[in-house]
Image (tube, rainbow, N blue to C red):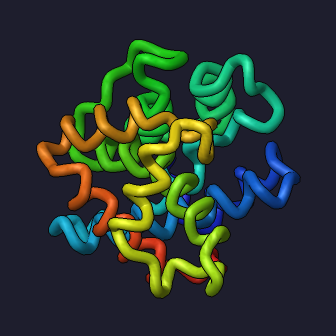
């Protein structure tokens, strides 16, 4: 079964109650939808959004089994293996050996951590918004390893490499995607 974005949201809420995790799921879902449309996969936008919403299904309740427990949970709900593979692959080289294969999986891998970093940079701005955020501001904070230390620069860079994109291009596109999200303040 491939759930709709709304069904994915309901499932995410069954395993996540914290505002941070729910908001992150919404943001990544919206960012994935934006990328689907920008990269020529508009007919798959719901699927990309669903994957984005569900990517951290297990993180709040099972952080030590992240991207492992979610596979079990999704199979219990009868979710399609394409969703299970896609969501698990964002933990590649961290918690699982499931490599991102499809362009959608590579985008998820690259933007999951990056959306957190961009959000942290935006909060530090006078506007507290991505609406006026520029790549150079993100790059400045990106260099400071203590800033948003939980956002892996290694994963972001590996994701950009997987996609064959320059880091600045990935950051710029992701800022644009976050500006289009209703979940971003």
* Foreground of the two, 163 or 116: 116
> Where 44 sits versus 64, above or below?
below
Number of marks present in the image shown? 0
List x then y, in percent, for residue 92. 41, 23
Horizontal side of 172 relative to 175 (left or right) equals: left
> Where 161 sits versus 48, above or below?
above
| Residue at 83 percent of width and 32 percent of height | 61
List x then y, in percent, for residue 1. 50, 46
Furthest residue in direction left, as rendered: 164
List x then y, in percent, for residue 78. 58, 37
Horizontal side of 171 relative to 130 (left or right) equals: left
Residue 184 falls in which quadrant of the image? Answer: bottom right
List x then y, in percent, for residue 55. 55, 43
Q: From this viewpoint, is residue 52 visible? A: yes
Q: From this viewpoint, is residue 81 visible? A: no
| Residue at 29 percent of width and 65 percent of height | 36
> Where 16 sits versus 171, above or below?
above
Quadrant including the C terminus: bottom right
* Foreground of the two, 82 or 170: 170
Furthest residue in direction top, as rendered: 97
Residue 149 falls in which quadrant of the image? Answer: top right
| Residue at 18 percent of width and 65 percent of height | 39
Horizontal side of 54 relative to 10 (left or right) equals: left
| Residue at 64 percent of width and 23 percent of height | 72
Residue 109 falls in which quadrant of the image? Answer: top left
């Amino acid at each position: 079964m491939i759930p709709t974005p709304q069904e994915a949201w309901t499932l995410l809420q069954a395993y996540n109650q914290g505002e941070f995790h729910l908001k992150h799921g919404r943001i990544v879902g919206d960012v994935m939808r934006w990328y689907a449309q920008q990269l020529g996969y508009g007919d798959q936008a719901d699927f990309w959004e669903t994957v984005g919403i569900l990517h951290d299904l297990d993180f709040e309740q099972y952080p030590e089994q992240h991207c492992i427990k979610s596979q079990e949970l999704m199979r219990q709900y009868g979710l399609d293996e394409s969703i299970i593979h896609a969501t698990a692959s964002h933990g590649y080289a961290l918690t699982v050996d499931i490599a991102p294969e499809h362009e959608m999986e590579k985008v998820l891998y690259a933007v999951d951590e990056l959306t957190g970093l961009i959000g942290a940079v935006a909060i530090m701005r006078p506007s507290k918004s991505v609406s006026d955020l520029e790549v150079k501001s993100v790059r400045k904070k990106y260099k400071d390893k203590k800033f948003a230390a939980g956002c892996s620069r290694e994963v972001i860079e590996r994701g950009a490499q997987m996609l064959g994109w320059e880091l600045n291009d990935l950051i710029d596109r992701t800022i644009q995607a976050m500006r289009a999200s209703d979940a971003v303040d």
